[in-house]
Image: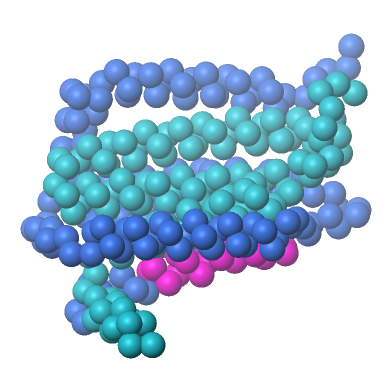
Amino acid sequence: MQLFDVVFYLFALVTIVSAGIVVFSRNVIYAAFSLLFTLFGVAALYVMLQADFLAVTQVLIYVGGILVLMLFGLMLTSRVVSVDIKGSSVQTAPALILVALVAGSLAGIFYSTWKSVPAASSAAVTTTPLLGTLLMTTYLLPFEVASVILLVTLLGAAFIARRKRKA
Amino acid sequence: MGALEHVWGEFASWLPHVQLAHFLIVSALLFAFGLYAIITRRNAILLLMGVELVLNAANLNLVAFSHYKMLSLDGQAAAIFVIILAAAEAAIALAIVLNIFHRFQTVNVDEISSLKE
């Protein structure tokens, strides 16, 4: 077992265990903070897949943006007086069976189909300039559409979240 | 028992050499956890966290295939767009959730069943 494998199992364990805490925790604040470790673990797996730009993007956008937004949402929507901070779950038994089936079949398919794939070249490449070129050539139209979507999102979120003035 | 031991022996000898399928299995587990959260959680924001887990699982698949199959970074470009859309989705959804909270005083998705007051 080489260093790569050890590091992979470490980060895979961090990712999976903290994802489990996100899903099974009764306390929504614990769930939110363990989502942090899940996202960091996925970023580390991106690094192991030589996706350096994506790893940094993951940390910046998911951890710095989305997670903070969710924490804000949790804090603003949990009533302090009634301490309604429990995240109750319903239908746990059938959901557990269904999800175990889905996970088992997915993992089985992945294992049996891609059990022996030739190892990728371990030569270090910097993906950032290549991705920038790709975004400006092949994916130019989706890139522009994404910028329009972000503008619409900005306006829409500000408009929806604004408190209506009582007439 | 012999067949089971044979399968397990094969799996145990495969396990230490990390390659494509390892990443895919991690992503399958992430997807399953996200699905579980979407099914069972009743707090709208925890539901959103389940959606983020599912999106992360899909992204991990895209990047893993992009690395191991030499798909010339197309998978990573797709993953970037997924991240952009996830950010937009989270912002809009949280704005809607905050509005719902002001109106109904709850974020339990089972209790939010009317369009008008």
Q: A61 left or right of A44?
A: right
Question: What coloring was used for the rendering?
Answer: by chain
Residue at the (60%, 21%) spot, across then down? A156
Residue at the (73%, 35%) spot, across then down? B98
Which residue is nearer to you in this view: A26 or A118?
A118
Q: Position of residue B27 (x, y in %)?
A: 40, 57
- Relative to A88, residue A8 above or below: below
Q: Quadrant of residue B116 in the image?
A: top right
Q: Position of residue A114 (x, y in %)?
A: 24, 59
Q: Quadrant of residue A90 in the image?
A: bottom right
Residue at the (25%, 25%) spot, across then down? A139
Residue B104 visible to the viewer: yes
Residue A31 visible to the viewer: no
Q: Quadrant of residue A165 in the image?
A: top right
Residue farthest to the top, as pictured: A167
Q: A130 left or right of B108?
A: left
Q: Position of residue A166 (x, y in %)?
A: 88, 17
**Numbered marks: total:** 0
Chain rendered cyan: B
| Rendering colour (chain A) | blue
Residue farthest to the front, as pictured: B2
- Which range of residues does the magenta coloring cover? A11-29
- Relative to A78, residue A137 above or below: above
